Image: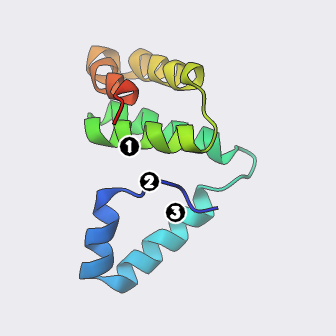
Amino acid sequence: MTLPNPGSWQGIIEEASPQLFKDVTTLRDNVLTDGALSMKVKVLMTMLCDALLAHDHGVENIANRARAIGATEEEIAETIGVAFVMGGTPALVTGANAFKKS
């Protein structure tokens, strides 16, 4: 299953380097699929990482992607809680972008 709401960087890479885009997309599709962990859990993990790395727009986009594949507001909130425990207030502030309504 292809993830909804592709990142803005994907269109740029696809145009600039079609082969790199193909390689990256293939790898992402192989990793972000149901396995021992569900795709939903993996997407929530990517949101957590973006919160820790202070990618506010990434958190918002990934939260919407997670919602599109069935994540609940409670699951998103718990993920942001884990980001706070691991990254402190900066991760919490960035993580708050998960609740922006685009």
Q: Quadrant of the N terminus?
A: bottom right
Residue occupying image coordinates x 39% and y 17%: 84
Marks 3, 1: nearer the viewer: 1
Residue 89 picture quarter? top left
For marks 1 and 2, the one nearer the N-term is: 2
Q: Are marks 3 and 1 in contact (CB under 8 Å)?
A: no
Q: Quadrant of the C terminus?
A: top left
State the CA–CA distance, disc 3 to disc 1.
16 Å
Residue 55 picture quarter? top left
In the rendered view, would you say 42 is above or below 86? below
Describe residue 60's horizontal placement relative to residue 54 as left or right: right
Residue type pointed to by label 3: Arg
Residue type pointed to by label 1: Asn
Q: Which mark is residue 28?
A: 3
State the CA–CA distance, disc 2 to disc 3.
14 Å
Residue 94, given in percent of the width and then of the height, sits at 29, 26
Q: Which mark is residue 61?
A: 1
Residue occupying image coordinates x 36% and y 36%: 60
For marks 2 and 3, the one nearer the N-term is: 2
Residues packed near mark 3 inside 10 Å, few (<14), some (14 to 19) or many (20 plus)? few
Decide if residue 38 is in sight here.
Answer: yes
Residue 35, given in percent of the width and then of the height, sits at 74, 52
Q: SS at mark 2?
A: loop
For marks 3 and 1, the one nearer the N-term is: 3
Q: Are marks 1 and 2 in contact (CB under 8 Å)?
A: yes
Residue 2, given in percent of the width and then of the height, sits at 58, 62
Q: Which mark is residue 44?
A: none
Residue 32, given in percent of the width and then of the height, sits at 59, 55
| Residue at mark 2 | 5
Residue type pointed to by label 2: Asn
